Image: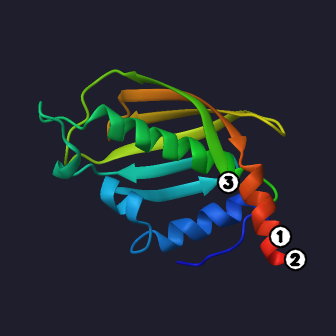
Amino acid sequence: MTTIPWGVGSGLDRVRRLADDLASAYLPHAHLGLAIDRADKGLVELRWTPGDAILNRAGTVHGGYIATALDEACGLAASSASEPAAPFLTMSLNVDYLRPVLAGVVYTVTGEVLQASRTRTLVRATVTDPLGRLYCQASGALTPNRKLLAAAAADGA
């Protein structure tokens, strides 16, 4: 995995590099079954094939893992819109579960920046199936992690 300090280059470039590295490097994405299919400024699409390891006792994907996938889409969308590249912290995440998510099905998780400012970015994320049916959605408010940016700047100085 290519390690590039925060605050260097654009967030979109960083998300695209992450997409190239994900196949073997980023454990949370591998565990969840996530891969980045598309990254544009303020918009990301992830391919999600949940595995049996994240099922609840009812045999459907656990809501916590669904929230994690939605949160990851929100964070990547926010980062992709940042210049210089910035990591983001989730301030709030509101999730609506509409249909049960099943293991082995290929879903699309989309994150889209609705409004960005210096201190707060509003993002919407969705989980849809191959037919475009909405399974889950989330709205989130994120903020740049200024402490991590400052630490990266100090390391680079």
Q: Quadrant of the C terminus?
A: bottom right
Q: Amino acid at mark 1?
A: Ala
In this orientation, which residue lies closer to the viewer: 124 or 91?
91
Residue receiving disc 2: 157
Dots 2 and 1: beta carbons under 8 Å? yes
Mark 1 or 3, closer to the camera: 1
Q: Nearer the viewer, residue 29 or 114?
A: 29
Disc 3 crowd, CA 10 A, few/some/many (<14, 14-19, 20+): many
Question: Which residue is painted at 59% across and 56% down in the image?
Answer: 39
The answer to whether the residue labelled 3 contacts the one labelled 2, judged by CB atoms less than 8 Å apart, is no
Query: Which of the labelled discs sits on residue 32, or is there none?
Result: none
Give residue 124's position: percent from left, percent from top.
Answer: 57, 31
Residue 44 x, y percent position in the rendering: 56, 49
Secondary structure found at label 3: loop
Q: Residue furthest right?
A: 157
Identified at 72% across, 58% down, the residue is 148
Name the residue beneath numbered marker 3: 87
Q: Residues within 10 Å of mark 2 (few under 14, many from 20)?
A: few
* Observer able to see residue 91: yes
Residue 56 lies in quadrant: top left
- The type of residue carrying mark 2 is Ala
Residue 132 vertical position relative to residue 147 in the rendered view, above or below:
above
Kindly state the secondary structure of the residue where label 1 is placed: helix
Seen in the picture, residue 96 relative to 86 is either above or below; the reply is above
Helix, strand or loop at mark 2: loop
Query: Is residue 31 left or right of 143 when viewed as pictured?
Result: left
Q: Earlier in the sequence, mark 3 or mark 2?
A: 3
Rendered residue at 44%/67% (across/down):
26
Above or below residue 102? Residue 88 is: below
Rendered image: mark on residue 154: 1
